[in-house]
Amino acid sequence: MKASTVDDMRAPLKTLRFLVDEFPELPAADVHVSTLFPDRVELAFHDDLGAFEQWRAALAIRPDAVRFGTQGVDDSTMNLRAEGPYGACTLSLVAYGPTPAGLCETEVAA
């Protein structure tokens, strides 16, 4: 369902307000809410995987719910993604950071 009024965005906006009140000490994130997905809030962290982990733990999202991927022509950027229900919304956490050297390399047996 696409939101057509600000009132249609009530759930994610209330969720953001609650997160600020409940977790004021946690690291700041890029915040994304969308009229296309009015039941979703995304918190994104760039070059700070530790901030992602702090939020994941605070929101009680299980470690095994975190998905790992790489992006870029040479897989030089890794991403972590996790989501779970939070209030009336789905809360998504996303983190981007440089891929550690050797993480994506595979050896070919001779």
Image (cartoon, helix red, strand yellow):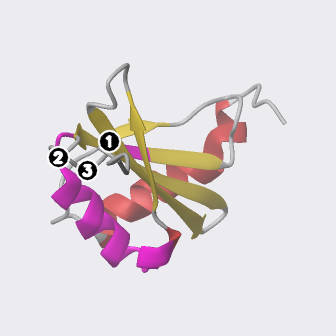
Instruction: Answer with left or right where residue 102 lies relative to residue 17.
Output: left
Q: Which mark is residue 50?
A: none
Residue underneath mark 1 = 78
Q: Kindly identify the residue that appears in the image at 75 percent across and 31 percent down.
A: 3
**Label 2 or label 1, whichever comes before in sequence order:** 1
Which quadrant is the N terminus positioned in?
top right
- Amino acid type at circle 2 is Pro
Evaluate if marks 3 and 2 touch, with contact meaning CB atoms under 8 Å apart. Answer: yes
- Amino acid type at circle 1 is Met
Mark 3 lies on a secondary structure that is loop
Q: Kindly identify the residue that appears in the image at 67 percent across and 63 percent down.
A: 88
How many angstroms separate mark 2 from mark 1 (CA)?
8 Å
Q: From the top left corner, tell me how far across and down residue 80 is, in percent.
A: 39, 52
Is 42 above or below relative to 73?
below
Residue underneath mark 3 = 103
Q: Which mark is residue 100?
A: 2
In front of the other: 55 or 20 = 55
- What is the span of residues highlighted in magenta in the rendered image? 43-64
Evaluate if marks 3 and 1 touch, with contact meaning CB atoms under 8 Å apart. Answer: yes
Is 14 above or below relative to 72?
below
Q: From the top left corner, tell me how far across and down residue 27 is, in percent.
A: 18, 55
Mark 2 lies on a secondary structure that is loop
Q: Kindly identify the residue that appears in the image at 60 percent across and 68 percent down.
A: 87
**Label 3 or label 1, whichever comes before in sequence order:** 1
Evaluate if marks 2 and 1 touch, with contact meaning CB atoms under 8 Å apart. Answer: yes
Task: Looking at this view, name the residue that lies furthest to the front.
Answer: 110
User: Taking the image as drawn, is residue 61 in sight?
Assistant: no
